[in-house]
Amino acid sequence: MYQKITLRNGVRVVAERIGHVRSAAIGVWIGNGSRFESAEQNGISHFIEHMIFKGTEKRTARHIASMMDAMGGQSNAFTTKDCTCYYMKVLDTHLHTAAELLADMFLCSSFADEDIELERGVVLEEIDMYEDTPEDVATEKLFEACYEGTALGRPILGTEETLARMDSKALHDYVRKNYHPEDTVVALSGSFSDADLDYICELFGEMQGSGRNQIEPAHYQPRVVIRSKEIEQNHLCLGFPGLPLLDDKRYAYQLMNAIIGGGMSSRLFQTVRERNGMCYSIYSFPSSHVDTGMFSIYVGLGQEDEAKAAKLICNVLRDFCAEGPTREELSRCREQLKSNLLMGLESTNARMHHLGRYELFTDHVVSSDELVAAYDAVTADQVRALANEVFRFDQASICAVGNTGDEAYYRSLIG
């Protein structure tokens, strides 16, 4: 069981005590990601995530790093389109210190201009690293194109041009405008005392501000995207309009993904790789947001196999729409999802992520038992009906990266 405390300033603290462990994981989740930025600010949420670790009003970056090492703990952060999370995992004997450090970083970062200049170079290298990974380019460029003209379609990392505009004032102004207590969740899981929890509530009760962030609506649009690169393989990403994050059919959606491209026994893997030997990597993945979603399929392969592989992929999808899943597929993938869920939640860090994500996006933490029951309740007819809703080829998109053909050629592959 978990407990939820809403502080007077609106910050929500969700905590789950686990008696048989010695570690504690604490994370601060803020309902602000790249889709809350203007075009001129693009990349600032991710840049702030980096800068949070670079010093506060009373600690240098070296001091922060030394404190974490002295505790033997782990710290990290990530930025998505919809949120940012800062988190730490330590032994319970160090939780008091870790919580104070995390609160200081989150609430009192200095954003010194000299540190910003150094970190700008780090993020530019991160962008270059992404550009050197054609699998990432294919998946991200397709998403950007299908949501072109909206904040959701802009890259999380920003661009060289937008990064050049970031300075201390811009970062402080953005935090004041977008880091609201009512959009903040502090998640805690593992071994902790009542005194630890009270102290954490005291720390984050100091957060100032009011209001909540509002998203700019975004809608999927079919696109064909081509990016020429001199590389050995071609990388294709197909896209279809998917489901929003909280859609009632989301559990059938996850099962459909597992059956179609979620593992080595999936239809795509067995058809394109195992029976035809055309690729090393092929998989499907859903991207869901509060107001929209996209279902994608990635494959990397030789240029000479593009047309045949695309035909095989489309045939797999059409057959699935016509027949739906077999009883064996539904049972196997149901167990796969339940096992991944339950085994993943055996770590305090994973449980903290579960608490924070659900509370931030749904205002309610769904228990593992509820999730298992939801997967068990999905029927084959529901999955088949959903497949026909998602796999509409008049709404299909494709991105090709590598030694590519023209737009008409790639449009014909998904026609």
Image (cartoon, helix red, strand yellow):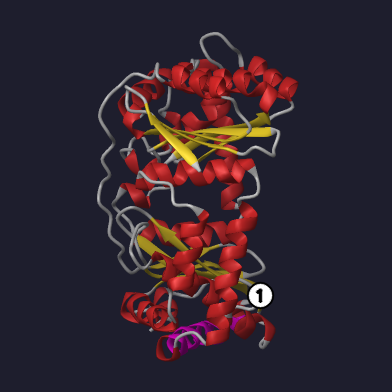
Residue 157 visible somewhere in the drawing: no
* Most foreground residue, 124 or 4: 4
Find the residue positioned furthest to the top: 58
- Residue depicted at 34% across the width and 18% down the height: 208
Question: What segment is highlighted magenta in the picture?
Answer: 304-320
Q: Secondary structure at mark 1?
A: loop
- Residue at the spot 62% in from the left edge and 53% down from the top edge: 344
Q: Position of residue 91 (x, y in %)?
A: 70, 29
Q: Is residue 349 above or below residue 367?
A: above
- The residue positioned 57% from the left and 45% from the top of the image is 351
Mark 1: amino acid: Met
Task: Judge the density around disc 1: few (<14), some (14-19), many (≥20) Cα neighbours within 10 Å.
Answer: some
Q: Is residue 347 left or right of residue 57?
A: right
x, y percent for residue 310 = 51, 82
Q: Would you say residue 339 sits in the magenta stretch? A: no
Location of residue 95 in the rendering, given as x and y in whole percent from the top left corner: 62, 24
Q: Where does residue 342 sit, x and y in percent of width and height?
A: 60, 57
* Residue tagged 1: 264
* On screen, residue 414 above or below 290: below
Q: Taken as a whole, is the magenta stretch helix, strand or loop?
A: helix
